[in-house]
Structure formats: C-alpha cells, structure tokens
Amino acid sequence: MINSKSKYRRSPLFYVGDKYKIISQIKKVFPKKIDRFIEPFCGGGTVFLNTEANFYLINDIDSYVIKLHKFLISNAKNINEFWGKVENSIKKYELSASYLGKNVPLDLRKQFIKTYYAKYNKESYIKMRGDFNKNKNNMLLLYLLVIYGFNRMLRFNSYGDFNSPVGNVDFNKNVYEALELYFEYVLKKDIKPYSMDYEKFIKKVTPTSNDFVYLDPPYLITNSEYNKLWNEESEIRMIELLDQLNKKGIKFAVSNVLYHRKKSNGMFNEWAKKYNIIEIESNYINYHDNTKKDSLEVLVKNY
C-alpha cells in the first residue's frame, strides 16, 4: 500500500533533469484535452506520468532510457514476479535495501556517517556492474545499477560500458513508491516508446491539431552531462521545427533556461517572444554543482 504524501508521480529512474519538483507548475498550463501526448525528450518520464491523454508517444535518443521504460512497462502486469526478481538480485549481490529492512550494520553507519551506503555496497556494485557489462541485456541489473549508482546516473563510457560508480543510496522507500505508482499508471495507459532523433520522431508520429507536443530538450547554456551533445545548431533546428508545428495548428510547450550563471540564451529568448512565456520557479541543479544558481527556467507555449 502506497502512502505517498505527494499527489504527483515521480519517475522511478530518478533521471537527471527530472521535472518532479516543478511538475505542478508545468501541468497546470497544459491543454485540458489531449488526444496524443507526444514527448520527444521523455527522459525518466515524470511529465508523461502526470499528464492525462488518450495515448502517449514517448521518445528518447538514449536507447537505454527507452529500454528501461519498456522493461518496467512490461513488468506492470506481473508486479509480484518483478518484486521477487528484485529481492533475489539484492540478495544475490548482498546489497543493502532499506525498504526491505536490510540495513547497513550499525558499526559501519557510525564509522562512515555520511557515506555508509557507498562503503557497504561498493564491492557488490562493482560485481553487478561487471555482470551487466558482459552482454548489456539484463535490464533488471541496469535498473539496479542506476538505483544504487552515484546520483542515479545512466552513464556509459566510450566503449559502451556502464561506468557510473557506486552512490551513497540504496533501494529505499522512495524507489519502492515510485515504482508502484509507475506500474499502476502505465497499466491503464496506451504508451508507445521510441528511440530516435527527436526530429525524425516528430516526423514519424505526424502530430495533428488534437495532439500536444511537450519538449524538454538539453539546455544549451548549462553544464550537465545530458547537455554535452547539444549545440547552437541543435537549438536552431528545434525552434524551426516548433515554428512548423505552430503553422500547422499543433499545440506545443517547451522547457528551457534563458539565463544561467552569467550565461544567457539570447537566440531562444528572442524566438520565444512571439509565443507565451511562463516563468518557472525552480532551482536548476546538475550533479557537478548542486548549489543554488542564478538562473531563469521558462515554459514557452503557443496557445
């Protein structure tokens, strides 16, 4: 039984750039009636998990993000079996799991007050990571690597191996609740996942005036790992695509940051002026630096 205080669902991937803390601000300005909710940069999925529509078309260029969504969606009908596999894997690798009452020994918690999860799980995590990297097909292991990993990042090196280090976290109540709410939601919804370039995705699904497109692209002027492959050319390509959607009478909303730590996104700011700009109260952070920033996050919509 879930006893979550929040009325919003959080992605069980706990993804970088997750919109959970600002979903209430975003959700309230979305159209009331949506046939197909189309999300080209779905990431962990917090936005689609909190949006009512008849159908959901979600996409991410990171194939492992989509593989994890497909894996979790496929387990929604067999929750007891899923939890059995989770518990067996935790037991096999001798990981801590506070939601199961499998806590780190007290002496270790006293010795390493702030890092005891990482100290306890490190060797087991490295073994699990090595097992996953042998063929990279076991999505349960990948999910557990994310949950027990540093800042819960989904990160691979240039050889294609998962390489996030162990984090000071474990499988806790928040993870359990996020998964249960995810399973409950996706079981009742018609969701079709894709993994391709966002522009190709939009062309493939061919939005109509009854649909709604929400974009949360990498932010041009911020420094997170997720944003490294995004440049000015990418930004221009996106705003040109949005103008095309607008001409066709297709509703869209796009999240972005107008300025951040003395950097400004003048190109996006100028483009956005012809649409409706909504300022979002947020504390944009990334894993390199989680201090409060001088930044302005916005939602731009054409309706």
Image (cartoon, rainbow, N blue to C red):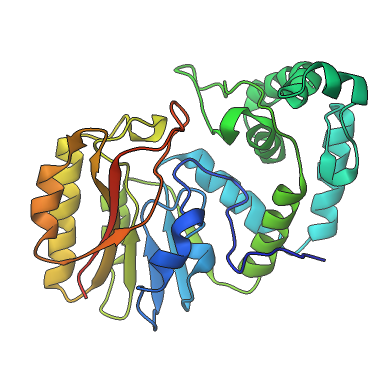
Quadrant into which the C terminus falls? bottom left
Residue 129 shows in this picture = yes
Across and down, in percent, residue 41 comes to 38, 51
Residue ID at (51%, 55%): 20
Residue ID at (74%, 35%): 170
Q: Is 41 located above or below residue 144 in the figure?
A: below
Which residue is at the front of the view, 271 or 241? 271
Which residue is at the front of the view, 132 or 264? 264
In which image quadrant can residue 154 be found? top right
Residue ID at (17%, 56%): 241
Across and down, in percent, residue 38 comes to 37, 65
**Side of 100 where 147 appears, left or right:** left
**Side of 288 where 209 appears, left or right:** left
Residue 75 shows in this picture = no
**Side of 37 where 142 appears, left or right:** right
Across and down, in percent, residue 49 comes to 54, 64
Q: Is 277 located above or below residue 220 in the figure?
A: below
Which residue is at the front of the view, 143 or 153? 153
Q: Check the image and name the residue furthest to the bottom.
A: 33
Residue ID at (60%, 27%): 150
Across and down, in percent, residue 90 comes to 84, 35
Quadrant into which the N terminus falls? bottom right
Q: How many marks?
A: 0
**Side of 252 where 241 appears, left or right:** left
